[in-house]
Image: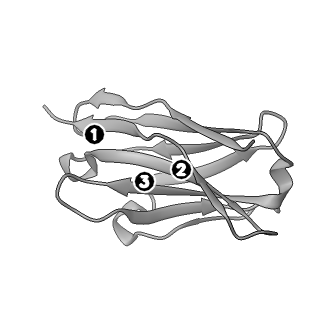
Amino acid sequence: QVQVVESGGGSVQPGGSLRLSCGFSGDTFAWYHIRWYRQASGKERELIAASTDGGGSTIYVDSMKGRFTVSRDHAKHTVYLQMNRLTPEDTAVYYCSAYDLRSRNSYWGQGTQVIVSS
């Protein structure tokens, strides 16, 4: 059974950095795109980044380009979201999902909270 587990959230001051991890298990990692989303309080969940098995990665939100990067460790079946120069607007619950290219099913983690505050 596919499982996706986020970790690495926490509280940080503005300007700080965090690295979130998305651990994958239960199937062949190469068949899955890993996507990062976030949901701020009172707002809809938004897609912010994605990683493919071919090594490609995309940051979708303009305000994150240049601050956030996505990387994929094939050996560890883990995708990382490195977040730098964090602002209070980045405060949200961050989720990752594993999208199965064959079945088109998505599997979600439980989310990890990020709080950016002075």
Residue 73 spot, x, y in % from top left: 76, 41
Picture coordinates of residue 49, whole percent (x, y):
53, 61
Query: Could you say whether the residue bearing mark 1 is in a helix, strand or loop?
Result: loop
Any part of residue 97 in sight: yes
Position of the C terminus, as image quadrant, is: top left
Looking at the picture, tell me which residue is in the foreground, 108 or 75.
Answer: 108
Give neighbour class at mark 2: few <14, some 14-19, many 20+ (Cα, 10 Å). Answer: many
Residue 112 placement: quadrant: top left
- Residue marked by disc 1: 15
The mark closer to the camera, 2 or 1, is: 2
Could you say which disc has been placed on residue 56 in the image?
Answer: none
Q: Name the residue under label 3.
A: 67
Above or below, comparing residue 41 to residue 84 in the picture: below
Task: Using a 10 Å C-alpha cutoff, classify the residue at mark 1 as few (fewer than 14 neighbours), some (14 to 19) or many (20 or more).
Answer: some
Name the residue located 81 percent from the left edge and 49 percent from the top edge.
29
Local secondary structure at mark 2: strand
- Which residue matches tag 2? 96
- Looking at the rendered image, the disc whose residue lies closer to the viewer, 3 or 2, is 2
Neighbourhood count class around disc 3 (C-alpha, 10 Å): few under 14, some 14–19, many 20 upward = some
Amino acid type for the residue under numbered disc 1: Gly
Tell me the quarter of the picture where residue 115 sits: top left
Looking at the rendered structure, the kind of residue marked 3 is Arg
